[in-house]
Amino acid sequence: MIRPLVCATLVLSLAGFPLEAADARDAARLAALERLVHDPQPKVRLEALRSLGRIQDARSAALALEVLDQPMDPALDYALWLTINELAEPWIAALESGAWKAEGHEKQLAFALKSLKPEQVSRVLGRVLNERKLARDGSGPWIELVGEAGGAKELGALYRQALEGGFDPAAAARALTSLDNAVRNRKTRPDGDPKAVRTLLDSTAPEVRAAALRLAGSLKSLGAAELRLDAFAGTDAAETVRNAAFDVLRSLPAAEAGPVLSKLASAPDPTIRTRAVATWAAIDLSAAGPAVVTVLKSLDDEDRAVAFWRSLLAVKGAAKSLTPLMPESGLPAAAARAGMRAAREGGRSDVDLAAALAKAGGIAADAQAFTGQWIKDLAAKAVASGDPNRGEMVYRRTELACVTCHAIGGAGGRVGPDMTSIGASAQPDYLVESVLKPDAKIKEGYHGVIVETKDGQTVSGTVVRESGTELVLRSPANQELVLPKSNIEHRTTATASLMPGGLLDSLPEADQVDLFAFLSRLGKPGDFDASRGGIARRWRLANLVHTDVQNGKEDWMWKAAPADRRWTDILSRVNGDLTRALMEGGTRADFWTAKLAVLAMTEVTTATPTRATFSLQAGAAAELWVDGAKVTGPVDLAPGTHRVIVRIDPTKAPEKIRLESKDVSFRLD
Ligand code: HEC
């Protein structure tokens, strides 16, 4: 430690710096830390970062940011965030004086900005962006950073550039979205004429039209007619634009949106009609009532009916107002069943509505009929003659929704308890009762809460987390809902289970017997033991087609997010096999024909640099690819998430795919 001290003191003295003793010590420590920040060991880099935080100097901030030149991990990320937080003021001073230059350090700058307080970011952005325009293609982090942290002036500059056609369509859409976030989340409006956004509604690029609509909706500067919402919602060719139009309609006052929605409620396209009526009901339930009934009479697809009912019942007081409107008879059974399910899920028990629906749909009544003897008999049959393999397929049916709420081996929803070892830990009678009469015994920790919001919504679910300002619920559809506490009017604990009753009402007894045979085997040794890790359970399937290759777009498979529409989501069986039958069931019928390759994608994570060995069963013709390269032996992985794709020759479809590795974690989300 002595030598660096001498050197640094010498160098700085020669440069004409009058040195105090404390400065000299800092300089020496900085020189030593400069080396440690670049050390190959992440642990050493971490320690170096924390020491830098204690030296209040622009040079230590600049050094700390250099840690980004090497791979990061969550611990380093957090340490750097803390350090920059502590060194914010000296770093900003260096930036303002020009001693620290943003050019060539965009990544460091972006990280630093995300670590600062909003008022600090606004200062920095004003300084860095100055009068400069952003790149046409919107490269770099600037567009989003301005939205997250810019003041009216910086937002105004972004707005102007978008209005003047200074961006490519994709970048223009990002700019408008970023402005929209600033208006909605931070209540900060861009300088400039708020009506001018109208010109972008005529853009030929659908993403620009959609983003412009949303921004116009948030700015509230144009009326429904000027926004041409009826045309955008009803006839625009792009789904993104229609979605945006419906979202804007929903945010408008009933007097303005009502007439548009009532017109759309008789549109020729049934999905538009359904959507319009659901939106109308959300803003003016009594006016929309008759249209609701008309839509229900036309719904015979249960999934769509459940979605429709859920959006209806999210409106405060909806069950009560809709009950008297239900017809005496003549409602399609699917629409009625869907309503009964929605009325009983999420801890609500809108009994009157469920009863009215049972009648309207001609469905036999209710759970109360399941006596103790009934339950015992069904459990005994399941044990004696149930087929657990068939039962697994029953469990996976989308209309039963078990998978949406429950996970096995970590794969699946998290609204209800994990089912991995339910068969080993619970008696068959208990399983049958839990499913037929969910309200009989509610599992500890799974009581739901029901929240009424000040803007007229009723939402329910389990508590994911809670802070002083926010409550986060997991809805019965397995989505996280973030509720600002300032918007909560009333909150109660549900007395009914979040699991809806009546799920098996329309399931033949043989299927019920198999389902319970399956549940009672879960967690016992053999084919239904999902407790072992190291196996891929969550897959996404897609086809590689000739045009991908002709257009040089073959690399989409490494770029498209897992949620991208080209991927079809599918879980393996409990034992880890993704069978051919499952693949065919989960995709289009022509899955194996006339394609270059069938792709099965999964993702893995590693916490440290890892040499990973994969074991793949997928027939002789399958290839294993990792992060864009074909793999035949062990592969070296940096810490982070990696994409693994099994590439299958469609003429040699395998009976199953199975991928294992003890060296990595397979992602389940
Ligand atoms: C809307 C979400 C939801 C759906 C759909 C759902 N469940 Fe549940 N389930 C829950 C919740 C929440 C609990 C815990 C509360 C309770 O005990 O009632 C639960 C509890 C259970 C239990 C008891 C678990 C225990 O450890 O006590 C079983 C068994 C069960 N569900 C099976 C099923 C099956 C089989 C299906 C499909 C036919 C299904 N569930 C559909 C949410 C759901």
Image (cartoon, helix red, strand yellow):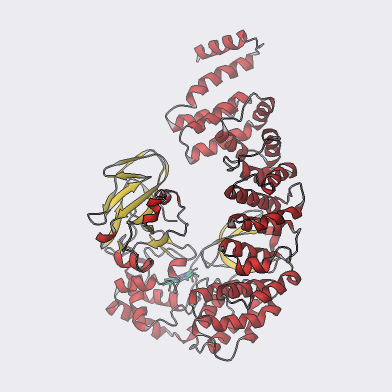
Which quadrant of the view contains residue 291?
bottom right
Looking at the rendered image, the quarter that the C terminus falls into is bottom left
Q: Is residue 451 at all visible to an observer of this figure?
A: no
Q: Position of residue 271 (x, y in %)?
A: 56, 73
Which quadrant of the view contains residue 599?
bottom left
Q: Position of residue 80 (x, y in %)?
A: 55, 35
Q: Residue at x 29, y 75 (%)?
A: 387
Residue 53 vertical placement versus 502 (above, below): above
State how many labels appear.
Answer: 0
Q: Is residue 99 at all visible to an observer of this figure?
A: yes
Please state if 410 lies on the left or on the right of 342 as rendered.
Answer: left
Residue 482 vertical placement versus 558 (above, below): below
Q: Position of residue 664 (x, y in %)?
A: 36, 47
Q: Residue furthest left?
A: 620
Q: Residue at x 46, y 77 (%)?
A: 503
Q: State the residue in front, 320 or 463.
A: 320
Q: Position of residue 493 (x, y in %)?
A: 60, 68
